[in-house]
Image (cartoon, rainbow, N blue to C red):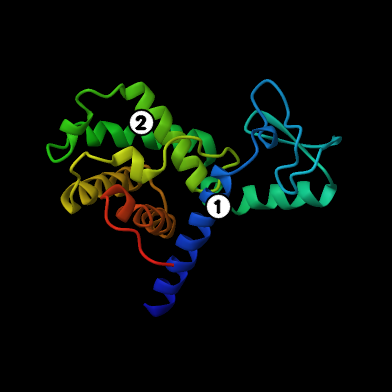
Amino acid sequence: MKLILTSLATICLTMTLLVNAAMAIDPAAVATEAATNTVCPITGKPVDPSITAEYEGRKWSFAKEACKTKWVKAREDSLYQKLGGKPAMEAAVDAFYVKVLADDRVKHFFDDVSMDKQRRKQKEFLSAAFGGPLPWTGKDMRKAHEGMGLTEVHFNAIAENLVNTLKDLKIKQELIDQVVAIALTTKDDVLGRPKKAN
């Protein structure tokens, strides 16, 4: 049990660092659907246009071959990829919101929300949080949930719906545990609790 908790803590810390790093990334280091990036996402230096990798329909460029190798390995080892990448995020978020919007504990929070926009933002956030290549560019969790009056009951309802969605999609328990560990790293911010000292 101690080993599991240590592993979860390590995963949480790693994912928090990845999300924080992604939030600070230079936009030129991100490939778009129409164009490759001009800044290496690993070094922050100009890219060599001959060193590229394709990932989920985007062409990524790198400063050196070693950067490409590191980046590709990070994609392969990410929770995002282990869950199934972009198609899995799409399916999971869509199925998740079916559950959430049927849950009397939390559905009222979405009465005046554009669900198309909400689904898109959730897909982007989870992709970044789970190690996908695209950075999260939305609000931080504290600001996004500020003033909503959320409680432990609400947070737990959302977490329960997320876990049940992943189980319905036949995701392995060890991956669900990693998802839960990442979700727990947002709890204090979502609930507006005071920040813990570092």
What's the residue type where badge 1 is placed?
A: Leu
Query: Could you tell me which secondary element the residue under label 1 belongs to?
Result: helix
Task: Using a 10 Å C-alpha cutoff, classify the residue at mark 2 as few (fewer than 14 neighbours), some (14 to 19) or many (20 or more).
Answer: some
User: Residue 114: where, in percent of width, then height?
Assistant: 31, 21
**Image quarter for residue 113?**
top left
| Residue under the image location 24 percent in, 36 percent down | 99
Q: Which numbered disc flags the more N-terminal residue, 1 or 2?
A: 1
Q: Residue 126: give its label.
A: none
Q: Mark 1 = which residue?
A: 18
| Residue under the image location 23 percent in, 36 percent down | 100
Q: How many marks?
A: 2
Q: Is residue 96 left or right of residue 60?
A: left
User: Residue 42: where, in percent of width, then height?
Assistant: 72, 48
Q: Give the CA separation, mark 1 to mark 2.
A: 24 Å
Q: Is residue 81 left or right of residue 47?
A: left
Q: Residue 94: give its label.
A: 2
Relative depth, front residue between 11 and 24? 24
What's the residue type where badge 2 is placed?
A: Asp
| Residue under the image location 26 percent in, 31 percent down | 98
Q: Quadrant of the C terminus?
A: bottom left
Residue 158 vertical position relative to residue 86 in the rendered view, above or below:
below
| Closer to viewer: mark 1 or mark 2 | 1
Q: Is residue 13 left or right of residue 115?
A: right
Relative depth, front residue between 134 and 73? 134
User: Residue 41: where, in percent of width, then height?
Assistant: 70, 43
